[in-house]
Image: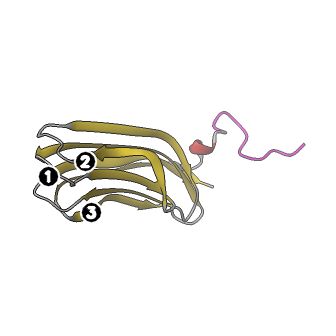
Amino acid sequence: MRIYGPSGSRNAPIDRNPARLGLGNVIAQAGGGSTILVTYTVPAGRRAFVTLWGTGDVTTALAAGQIGQVQFAVSGQTLNPDLLWDALSAVGTFKSLVVPGIFVAAGDGVSLTVTLGAGAGVLRATGGLNGYEYDA
């Protein structure tokens, strides 16, 4: 019989030399720009189990044709759904999203990006990730 993993009561993958992760950021994004809220890359020989979260609210009404977005991406692939504010969104329009339970391999990157089209509107966005990193 072969055992693939440690024996004993701590044999879940996340129990292999775990390190807690917690990253977050807040930004007021003006029109016509894009900013990375959070970025994280799993080190070589490690894996991660993360939860992504993001929120945003309109602090200055969006103009006609101006849209806002908070995108969640893993290894360059955008996850759907993401947060989207339509043109002419009113002040105080609030949205939030949590994407739980993502396993990420060594070398893979996770990012949250806020983008706001050209116009007079302003979007305040927060986002982050939390979880655990462990030996592969």
First reached walking from the N terminus: tag 1 or tag 2: 1
Q: Residue at x 49, y 62 (%)?
A: 76
The percent position of residue 98, horizontal first and vertical second, equals: 39, 38
Near-viewer residue (90 or 28): 90
Residue 90's place in the image compared with 120, above or below, is above
Quarter of the image with the N terminus is top right
Q: Which residue is mark 1?
A: 63
The amino acid type, in three-letter code, at marker 2 is Thr
First reached walking from the N terminus: tag 3 or tag 1: 3
Q: Which mark is residue 126?
A: 2
Dot 3, how many residues are within 10 Å of its Cα: few (below 14), some (14-19), or many (20+)? some
The amino acid type, in three-letter code, at marker 1 is Ala
Q: Which residue is mark 3?
A: 35
The residue positioned farthest toward the top in the image shown: 9
The percent position of residue 75, horizontal first and vertical second, equals: 51, 61
Do the numbered discs 3 and 1 sit on residues whose CB atoms are within 8 Å?
A: no
Magenta residue span: 1-10
Could you tell me if residue 57 is visible in this image? yes
Near-viewer residue (112 or 115): 115
Q: CA distance from mark 3 to mark 1?
A: 20 Å
Do the numbered discs 1 and 2 sit on residues whose CB atoms are within 8 Å?
A: no
